[in-house]
Amino acid sequence: MKNYYQPEIETMPLDQIQALQSERLVKQVKFVYENVKFYRDKMDEKGVKPEDIKGIEDLHKLPFVTKNDLRDEYPYGLLAVPLEDCVRIQSTSGTTGRRVVAFYTQEDIDIWEECCARAIVAAGGTKEDVCHVCYGYGLFTGGPGLNGGSHKVGCLTLPMSSGNTERQLQFMTDLGSTILCCTPSYAANLGEAVDERGLKDKIKLKAGIFGAEPWTEGMRRNIEESLGIKAYDIYGLTEISGPGVSFECEEQAGMHIQEDHFIPEIINPDTGEVLPEGEVGELVFTCITKKAFPLLRYRTRDLCRLTRQKCSCGRTHVRMMKPKGRSDDMMIVKGVNVWPSQIETVLLNQGFQANYQIIVDRIGNHDTIEVQVELTPEMVEDTSRTNSWREKQIVAGLKSMLGITVKVKVVEPKSIVRSEGKAVRVIDKRNLYQ
């Protein structure tokens, strides 16, 4: 069984990383220019030829690609190889518009699964582990990616998919699952279920690999406590390949980007200017090994920062800090920028769990925002505090965080619909009027 901690790749000195990236970038740009009309037209329009790209120092010369471009070119416009060379597609949910379909050659699948294998190893995974995958399978990349990575590590793999919590818990206890892979919101739900059924002493979980949706450090602590594990972040996008583009190591201080396959940049989202290391901006990725559906300078809309500060794990690949949100997740309410993560932070700091919804509406010309959050069972039992008192405390906390007054309603435990995949945190009714 191959060792998927690869010191020769993951601990490369910076100059060697950049030399490898430059070599692969030059080849990729030439390949894409020759095989994808969309890129050829975009580069010609900008006056850029493949020979102008001599290394990563020339990356800024290439045009950006956006999700709208991918939708406009659906389904085959960005395909860079003959269709008969493709072995799989994966797809986004399409909840915000036309679906994005990504194609994969067998080589693309192998590289993607290797990336996921590295993430599992970074979380302490070995062939002795039982990897419990309850990300969704099918077109969603979460299940297939971690499933393939688990196989490569040699774990006993449980392809559970999402939902059916009773079955999840049965297999978790009967088969001794040690690594849990799912969305953080579903991990929180499983933690609740474990506590309710008194199963904490019967599960053997040691680590969780959670991604596909934003989650805060407070939520991490709650999950770790409820399941008795160490919770690791993982990042990816269907457009780029899927989960495994970056992952946390035991330091839990940012996700190492797999720089032998992806070149990251941070840009000013308004001007497109490349920002220096350490500044917060929009994350951009260039794929330098993907063949069927290669993306150059793809704008992710995720806002974060990069750091090359030395990591105690020994990996030298640049780390991306947990995204503070997406440029399209930010709500402007009453003229103020509001991020769901800010609201979640206030709720968790006051002892609530991450079971909440944000409802935004527009009455006349005025925006309204309401946060509904569930009481915990302990809060229900604590008769020394009224619901009205708790609501006032949250209102004050949100006022301090956001600078605006937010209506708050505490509701009974289990009254907000649980998610078995990505959690629906925001309901923006203003869209009905657009």
Image: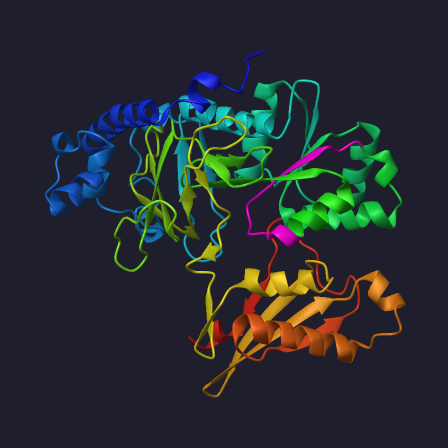
Question: What's drawn in magenta, residue-wise?
Answer: 204-218
Q: Is residue 178 left or right of residue 79?
A: right
Q: Does 258 appear in magenta?
A: no
Question: Would residue 350 appear left or right of 360 to someone viewing this image?
Answer: right
Please check the rendered image and state whether residue 209 is part of the magenta-colored stretch, yes or no. Answer: yes
Q: Position of residue 411 (x, y in %)?
A: 76, 71
Residue extending farthest to the left is 47
Residue found at x 71% / y 50%: 222
Q: How many marks?
A: 0
Q: Which of the two residues, 71 or 11, is positioned nearer the viewer here? A: 11
| Residue 299 in the image, given as x and y percentages of width and height | 34, 48
Quadrant containing the N terminus in the rendered view: top right
From where the camera sits, is residue 6 visible?
Answer: yes
The residue that appears at 81% across and 43% down in the rendered structure is 166
As drawn, the residue found furthest toward the bottom would be 364
- Residue at image position (60%, 20%) is 153
Which color scheme does this rendered protein use? Answer: rainbow
Q: Is residue 78 above or below residue 378?
A: above
> Does 148 appear above or below 282?
above
Give the quarter of the image for residue 156.
top right
In the picture, the quarter occupied by the C terminus is: bottom left
Q: Nearer the viewer, residue 424 or 313?
A: 313
Q: Position of residue 228 (x, y in %)?
A: 77, 40
Q: What is the quadrant of residue 291 in the picture?
A: top left
Q: Is residue 328 left or right of residue 407?
A: left
Residue 420 can be seen, yes or no: no
Is most of the magenta stretch helix, strand or loop? loop
> Horizontal and vertical percent for residue 242?
48, 37
